[in-house]
Amino acid sequence: MNFINNKWMRAAVPALLIHCSVGTVYCWSTFKQAIAEQIGMSPFAVGWAFSLAIFFLGMSAAFVGKLVERDIHKSSLISCVCFSVGMVGTGFFIQFTTGIVALLGIYLCYGFIMGIGLGVGYLTPVKTLMLWFSERKGLATGISIMGFGLAKAIATPIMELIQKSLGISAMFYILGCAYFALMFLGHILLKKPDGWVEPDGAKSDFKPLSMFKDKTFVGIWLMFFLNIHCGLALITYEKQILELVFGVGAVAIAVVPSVTAAFNALGRIGYSSVSDKMKERNTVYKIIFTSCIAVSLLAFFTGAITGGFGIAILGVIAVTLLLVVNLGYGGGFSTLPALLSERFGMDRISKIHGLALSAWAIAGLTGNNMSEIILNTTGKNYNIVLIAIAVLYAVALAVCLIMVGKKGTVKK
């Protein structure tokens, strides 16, 4: 097979180029404080830019499925342009404006424009990967979505270096241009297998929103939403949790986030690859929810975050909590496309997958804000957060068992 026309060069490599770029949205905590100081606004107000980015990521993915099915090159180019323009525009408003004008500009560029680039870019390579890796769909989506998880680990030290040496605005300019180059290369390389012909959409009466009448799809949507909601409720407070357990300035605070990012990426390729060996992929979610319930309750009963048996044991339990939740958070993303194709077939997978990603949009607004509300009203009591996410993980497990159930006939 021609080197330039195989599944790695036409699917895996371009997917990684795109996902390793758009996945840097999770580097937000690296520069949020710097943005707030530069434009003279509170970190809380600035933080809504991230929530908006995740919201528009999910909503754009939900409504762009038809375009992705029809023309992956147009959708990959839209993603490349929107993401890069959003990055550069954010730098512009940080450098040349302050106060409410800067804040609204950042909402527009980082939240709305870049958010659209995120959603379109996240969705675009997935079906192409599953077509090229038809016998290992879990591995295929795991490779791509692992890139989204690895982006934080790769980009964080680069962002910190540029910030310290050239400033926050320059960071957005430089990375906006760099990611344009990477995503444009991915856009050029991405190609569906020779011989694959998309079903004629003109002859189809399929309406994506009708999927919400299907119990199985609603169940998948709910458990996906709850997994992201609970993950964000904990992951977005990772630094504060580590400071409570180890103390401000401890070495663990610098080391553990890189390890949790690696576990997030490992969950993305690990869980989805394992699902290829299972009789039904829903088993992965049963494992994710059960393990997350167990570590949340363990951390609660031992007082791992709020004080308990001693620093060594507390540290091990707290770090284990973060690792397991990150593992399941990543695995929930990467197993989703293969699970949907298992239940609904490949013909409309981009539309159905995009619609399912609307759960991500809602969870992006609810997850971290649930923790914010709990902590503000209980005097920073993380035990209440742990109980809340344990209960919600239990609800997700119930949905997984009752609504999603076992694999049946593929629905057309």
Image (cartoon, rainbow, N blue to C red):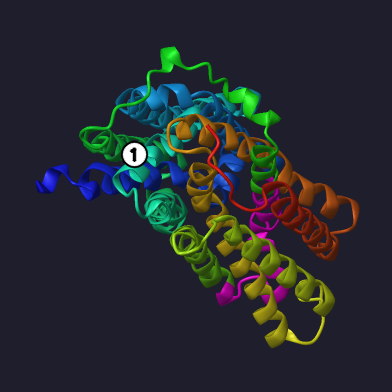
Q: Is residue 369 magenta?
A: no
Residue at 45% of width from left, 29% of height from top? 86
Direction left: furthest residue? 2
State the image quarter where residue 250 is shown: bottom right
Above or below, comparing residue 238 to residue 340 in the picture: below
The local crowd at label 1, few if under 14, some if 14 to 19, many if 20 or more residues have their Cα within 10 Å, is many
Location of residue 208 by image quarter: top right
- Residue drawn at point x = 40 percent, y = 51 percent: 137
Residue 327: % across, % down: 56, 64
Give the residue at the far right of this rendering.
378
Q: Nearer the viewer, residue 103 or 127?
A: 127
| The quarter of the displayed image where residue 161 is located | bottom left
Label 1 secondary element: helix
* Residue 301 in sight here: yes
- Tell how many labels: 1
Asked if the stretch drawn in magenta spans residue 248, the answer is yes
Above-or-below relation of 141 to 203: below
Left or right: where 76 falls relative to 117:
left
For image coordinates 75% across by 44% down, the residue present is: 369
Q: Nearer the viewer, residue 358 or 379?
A: 358
From this view, report whether residue 184 is shown above or below residue 133: above
Q: Nearer the viewer, residue 284 or 243?
A: 284
The residue segment tinted magenta is: 225-252
Residue at the extreme front: 409
In the displayed structure, does residue 85 sit left or right of residue 336? left
Q: Position of residue 48 (x, y in %)?
A: 66, 36
Query: Mark 1: which amino acid?
Result: Thr
- Magenta stretch: dominant SS? helix
Residue 42 can be seen in this image: no
Task: From the image, tell me which residue sits under label 1.
Answer: 128
